[in-house]
Amino acid sequence: MSLTLYRKYRPQTFEDVVGQNHIKATLQSELESNKVAHAYLFSGPRGLGKTTTARLLAKAVNCLKRKDGQSEPCNDCDSCKEIVENKSLDVIEIDAASNRGIDNVRENIISNSRFTPTSRNFKVFIIDEVHMLTTEAFNALLKTLEEPPAHAMFILATTEIHKVPETIISRCQHFDFRKVSETEIVKRLEKIIKQEKKKLDSEILESIAYFSGGCLRDAESLLGQVLSLSDKEITKEQAQLVLPKSQFEMVIELVEYFIRQDSVSAVILINKLVQEGVDLEKFTSDLIEILRKILLIKVGNELSEFATNLSKELEKKITEISKQISINFLVKAIEILIIKKQEIKFAEIPQLPLEIAILEIINEDVNQDDNSQAPPPSKLTEKKIPKNNFNQPTNQKPPIQQDKPTLSKVKITLEQITDKWQDVLVCLKKYNHSLASTLRIGQPSEIKSDGTLELCFKHKFHQQRINDIKNKQILEKVLEEIFGAKLIVKTAVVKNLPEQNKVEVQAITQDDSKKGLDNILETFGGQLVE
């Protein structure tokens, strides 16, 4: 049986390890000076070389031909050969997922560590997925790490460092493995292809690198599947039978429809994708990534290296597109797509959230100058109905969700509402944190003598959230608490809502521990689906 590529070409020297230079430099320096530690902890995502590096370290410390000032194992002595063939009695690999109890730790590690190596310098224990150990097992291991035998070395590996006790981490040299860049993955695949004496188009390698998501092992597995298709040169068409479908060309086609404001062609494209069985969630992710790439180019061309690498032809198209599109448009389009992507999975008509997103995006001004000034406050009351492909009366107003009660005249001005709007948001946060975050996106625009308070939003999605009966009741209750009068909330969508006139809401802040994703989910009232 032939070996898979990632096993066949497993690095046998530190030089062969890809993308972990920050780790290799330290380990090689320690080996050269013969000042290795007694315990190491390797953490990071799967498929990055944690176990491989652990074996290299074990091989190097026990290499019979390695001299002072050297770090690489010779791969020729008996000790190196035994480790490569998994026959060494002094290198013990333990899978903590299958041996997680205290008895396993006592028997496989603690008892064994007391015995000196059979004929080598160190008895090395490699414990994979160490986070799977039980609390009792960790406690037993801790004592050994605190007072290790001089001849024992422990190398722990984990994909979930947060599950490893701090007491364990503090007694190890901790190295965090990072995802490998697409450029480094392509170079590694090119080297393997050369050794395999095969021919493969560079675009196929770039696709493999992209779909691997920075995981070198996944990239090598995908390459193995592609190479199995033919003994001769493999075409892009053949490779597509194995690789996940790349929709970048269709994504860029859709972006071009955005620029032309061609909603009909854009919706037709989405429905064609559905007929072809394309994963719309993946397509939307690719669309967001392409828009992000264009955004980075707009901000500074040198930033494009932090986005997905594309073929030369597509890179050229992206560059041309960036000249026809504004930063404001890109930001708004990405915000809309992030929301709609969450809805696709649970939608009765899978393409509907994306179709709605397209109409909302095309309604935005693609070429609006990013530095243009917003209209004066007086323009707030000029309602603009979003243009779309449906028959819609120009005088249509957003529906009021409940009958408006008869109210006595209220003597509250718009200025008073604006002055206390921050108090409204802070109070509303106590009842509904998500609703407060949504409300901060809009602003009060008019207060009538009968107590009707008009709130304006730029997007219909936010208007709909406020118009929800329960949300409206909570908001009106808070308004009565703040202003001492019953106010009825009315909402409107205003396309050119001034950015600089939005009410300052510093009090509505997230905890320092909140990150970007949490902020987005909270703002748009969504939830994280795993």
Image (spheres, rainbow, N blue to C red):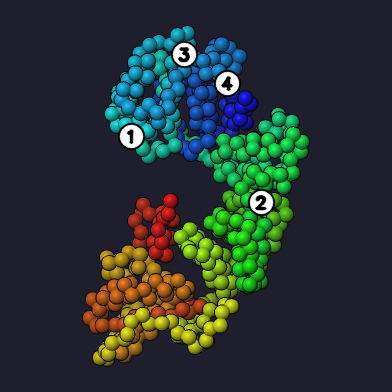
Q: Which is more N-terminal, label 4 or label 3?
A: 4
- Locate residue 148, reporting x and y percent: 35, 19
Q: Which residue is mark 4?
A: 72
The residue located at (56%, 79%) in the rendering is: 390
The residue located at (72%, 52%) in the rendering is: 312
- Locate residue 9, reporting x and y percent: 62, 28
Task: Indicate the secondary structure of the residue bearing disc 3.
Answer: loop
Q: Are marks 3 and 4 in contact (CB under 8 Å)?
A: no
Q: Which residue is mark 1?
A: 165
Amino acid type at mark 2: Leu
Does residue 416 show up? yes
Foreground residue, 269 or 424? Answer: 269
How would you rate the neighbour count of disc 4 (Cα within 10 Å): few for under 14, some for 14-19, many for 20 or more?
many
The residue located at (64%, 43%) in the rendering is: 242
Q: Which residue is mark 3?
A: 89
Does residue 292 show up? no
